[in-house]
Image (cartoon, rainbow, N blue to C red):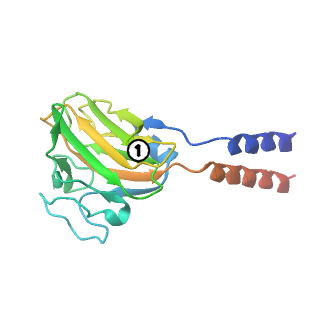
């Protein structure tokens, strides 16, 4: 009977596909993703320190992220990783608009921390595919008393990310996460391993 149950579980896992999901908790996001690269905006991929006011540009191109003009690093009141974070001077629809182009071909998870206690107004992260279609979005939980993490996972690769704030009086983000959703094949292999252990213990 145990073999039947395990076999059914393996079949179910084989039929699963990654789907879009949103997260307002860092631990939950990490539990649902793998291979996260964290851009801390303090040092470049080689470990060299960045300077406050420096345009980010292609600094993190080696990690699959390029930042359009207007994105720069600066000192934050409460950065997640000291001393710098990600700022933007592009104002759109009444608030700052952060954006980053994802050049790595296999990114299906992205998340970031809001670090300047935005005043409880609309804050949204949206992930897009290469055709400009929105894949997933998440709104910050608007708790001005915490460093708020918000992120998404998607069913297809992410090509562009936009973070829109509606408040110009307290905004900034830090520790951008770029990761992947585990493939269904990994779940199948894990269950097959469980099945093998079960057989050995009989």
| Residue highlighted by disc 1 | 131
User: Mark 1: which secondary structure?
Assistant: loop
Q: Nearer the viewer, residue 84 or 179?
A: 179
Q: Is residue 147 visible?
A: no
Residue at point 84%, 53% (across, down): 199
> Residue 168, located in which quarter of the rendered image?
top left
Q: Residue at x 63, y 53 (%)?
A: 186
Residue 152 quadrant = top left
Is residue 5 something one can see in this rendering? yes
Residue sitting at 37 percent across and 51 percent down?
177
Image quarter (top left, top right, bottom left or bottom right) of the N terminus: top right
Residue sitting farthest toward the top? 121
Q: Position of residue 145 (x, y in %)?
A: 24, 33
Residue 137 point in image, percent of width and height: 38, 35
Is residue 113 depicted above or below 58 in this figure?
above
Count how many numbered circles sit on residues in the image. Answer: 1
Please indicate whether residue 117 sits to the left or right of residue 178 in the image.
left
Expressed as whole percent of the image width and height from the top left, the position of residue 94 reads 15, 31
Q: State the residue lying farthest toward the front.
A: 131
As drawn, is 183 to the left or to the right of 59? right
- Residue 123, percent from left and from top: 27, 33
């Amino acid at each position: 009977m145990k073999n039947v149950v395990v076999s059914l579980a393996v079949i179910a896992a084989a039929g699963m596909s990654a789907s879009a999901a949103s997260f307002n908790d860092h631990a939950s996001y990490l539990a649902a993703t793998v291979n996260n690269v964290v851009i801390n905006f303090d040092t470049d991929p080689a470990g060299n320190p960045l300077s406050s006011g420096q345009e980010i540009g292609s600094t993190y191109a080696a990690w699959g992220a390029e930042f359009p003009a207007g994105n720069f690093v600066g000192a934050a009141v409460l950065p997640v990783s000291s001393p710098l974070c990600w700022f933007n001077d592009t104002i759109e629809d009444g608030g700052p608009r952060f954006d980053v182009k994802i050049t790595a071909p296999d990114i299906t998870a992205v998340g970031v921390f809001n670090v300047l206690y935005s005043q409880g107004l609309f804050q949204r992260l949206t992930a897009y595919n290469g055709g400009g279609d929105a894949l997933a979005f998440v709104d910050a939980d608007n708790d001005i008393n915490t460093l708020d993490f918000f992120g998404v996972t998607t069913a297809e690769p992410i090509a562009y990310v936009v973070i829109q704030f509606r408040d110009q009086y307290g905004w900034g983000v830090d520790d951008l996460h770029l990761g992947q959703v585990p493939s269904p094949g990994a779940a199948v292999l894990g269950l097959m391993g469980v099945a093998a252990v079960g057989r050995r213990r009989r």
